[in-house]
Image (spheres, helix red, strand yellow):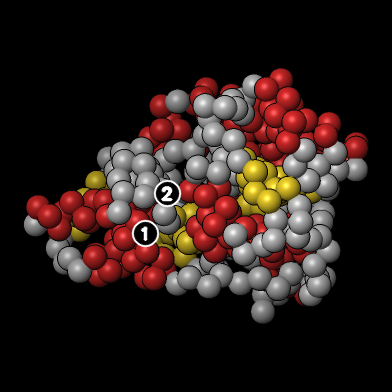
C-alpha cells in the first residue's frame, strides 16, 4: 500500500449509477473513446455517439444544439486532438486551440442541459517536467512543463480547472481523470507522429520484415509508464460510479520502464531479435513520468492487463488494421 493511500476514503459502494442512463461518449472513434464504448457494453445504459460529420466538437453552438436534442445524463469527454512529440512541436496552435474549444463547448453545454455527471479525460503530461516521482495529484502547477508537449498540457490543465470552476460556481458534478501513457486498439501507429508504444510496435514489425536493426528516438534511458487502454476505460467507469470531487485522479499502471528495455519487450512479444540503435539527435522528452495511483487504488480499482499481454493485443490490432496508419 502507498504511504498516501490511507489519506483517501474508499467508496466500496457506487455513489452514481449508469444503469438506465443516456451516456454520451464524446470522441467515441478515438482510442480511449472506443474503449469506453466497449466497456459500457457491460453496463445497462444507452450509449450516445456523434461522429465528426454530424457534429463539430469545436463549435460551441453546434454542441449545445446537439446536447439539447439528445439530453445525455452522463458524459465521458474523451475527445481531444492528440499526437506525439513531433506533432506537438510542429502544430502548437492546433493542439492548444482545438483542445480548448472542445473542452469549453462540451462543459458549457453539459451545464446548460443539466448533465448529472461528466468525466473529463486529461493526460499525465499536465505535470511539471521535473516533478518528484511517483507523481502525486498535488504536483500540478508546481513547476515548468516539458517543452515538447506544453501546448497540449496547458489545454488539459485548463480543462481540469474549467471542470473545477463549473463545480464551484454551478455545483456541477464534473470530475477529471489523468491517465498515464495509453496504448491499444485504435492507436496511431505512425512511427513519426504517434506515441512511443505504437511507434515501437510498427518499427519492430517493419524491422522484422526487413531483417534490419530497430532504431529508437533519443538515448533510450527515459522512463515511461504504460497502461492498456481497456484498463483505462474500466478506470473511467469506476470513477464515474465511485468518485465525486474537485481534485483530478491519476490513472496508471504503477510501474515504469526505460524505452530501450520496452523496445526489447516489444521485440520479444513480436518474436524478433536484432540490434537496437539509438538516435541521440531525437528528443528524449521528460526523463521520467510515473504516476502515484494511491487515490484511485483507495477507491477500489486496479489494472488487469499486464505489459506483455497488452503489447500482444496491440500487435494483433495493428495486424488487423485497427488503428490509424496501421
| 52 sits left or right of 24 in the view | left
| 287 sits left or right of 290 in the view | left
Residue at the spot 50% in from the left edge and 57% down from the top edge: 229
| 294 sits left or right of 80 in the view | right
In the rendering, at what x and y percent does residue 142 appear?
A: 68, 46
Residue at the spot 43% in from the left edge and 30% down from the top edge: 89
Please tell me which residue lies in front, 115 or 308. Answer: 115
Q: Quadrant of residue 83?
A: top left
> Looking at the rendered structure, which numbered label has been put on residue 12?
none
User: Which of the two labelled residues, at mark 2 and mark 1, occupies the earlier sequence position?
Assistant: 2
> Looking at the rendered structure, which numbered label has been put on residue 186?
2
* Residue 225 visible (yes or no): no
In the rendering, at what x and y percent does residue 235 appear?
A: 63, 62
Asked if residue 174 is positioned above or below residue 308 in the image, the reply reads: above
Asked if residue 319 is positioned above or below residue 110 in the image, the reply reads: below
> Looking at the rendered structure, which numbered label has been put on residue 314?
1
Helix, strand or loop for disc 1: helix
Q: Quadrant of residue 266?
A: bottom left
Report the number of numbered marks: 2
Residue at the spot 27% in from the left edge and 55% down from the top edge: 319
In the rendering, at what x and y percent does residue 38 appear?
A: 54, 57
Amino acid at each position: 500500500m502507498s504511504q498516501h493511500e490511507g489519506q483517501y476514503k474508499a467508496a466500496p459502494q457506487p455513489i452514481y449509477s449508469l444503469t438506465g442512463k443516456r451516456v454520451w461518449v464524446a470522441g467515441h472513434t478515438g482510442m480511449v473513446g472506443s474503449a469506453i464504448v466497449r466497456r459500457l457494453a457491460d453496463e445497462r445504459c444507452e450509449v450516445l455517439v456523434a461522429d465528426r460529420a454530424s457534429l463539430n466538437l469545436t463549435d460551441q453552438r453546434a454542441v449545445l444544439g446537439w446536447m439539447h436534442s439528445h439530453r445525455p445524463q452522463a458524459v465521458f469527454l474523451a475527445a481531444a486532438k492528440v499526437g506525439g512529440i513531433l506533432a506537438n512541436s510542429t502544430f502548437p496552435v492546433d493542439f492548444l486551440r482545438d483542445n480548448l474549444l472542445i473542452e469549453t463547448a462540451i462543459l458549457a453545454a453539459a451545464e446548460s442541459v443539466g448533465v448529472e455527471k461528466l468525466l473529463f479525460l486529461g493526460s499525465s503530461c499536465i505535470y511539471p517536467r521535473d516533478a518528484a516521482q511517483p507523481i502525486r495529484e498535488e504536483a500540478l502547477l508546481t513547476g515548468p512543463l516539458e517543452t515538447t508537449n506544453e501546448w497540449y498540457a496547458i489545454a488539459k490543465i485548463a480543462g481540469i480547472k474549467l471542470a473545477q470552476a463549473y463545480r464551484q460556481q454551478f455545483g456541477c458534478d464534473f470530475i477529471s481523470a489523468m491517465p498515464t501513457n495509453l496504448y491499444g486498439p485504435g492507436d496511431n501507429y505512425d512511427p513519426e507522429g504517434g506515441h512511443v508504444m505504437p511507434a515501437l510496435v510498427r518499427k519492430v514489425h517493419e524491422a522484422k520484415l526487413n531483417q534490419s536493426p530497430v532504431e529508437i528516438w533519443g538515448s533510450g534511458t527515459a522512463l515511461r509508464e504504460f497502461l492498456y487502454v481497456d484498463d483505462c476505460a474500466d478506470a473511467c467507469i469506476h470513477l464515474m460510479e465511485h468518485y465525486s470531487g474537485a481534485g483530478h485522479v491519476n490513472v496508471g499502471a504503477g510501474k515504469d520502464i526505460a524505452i530501450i528495455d520496452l523496445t526489447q519487450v516489444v521485440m520479444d512479444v513480436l518474436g524478433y531479435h536484432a540490434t537496437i540503435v539509438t538516435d541521440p539527435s531525437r528528443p528524449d522528452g521528460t526523463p521520467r513520468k510515473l504516476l502515484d495511483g494511491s487515490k484511485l487504488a483507495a477507491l477500489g480499482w486496479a489494472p488487469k492487463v499486464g505489459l506483455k499481454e497488452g503489447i500482444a493485443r496491440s500487435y494483433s490490432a495493428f495486424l488487423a488494421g485497427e488503428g490509424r496508419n496501421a
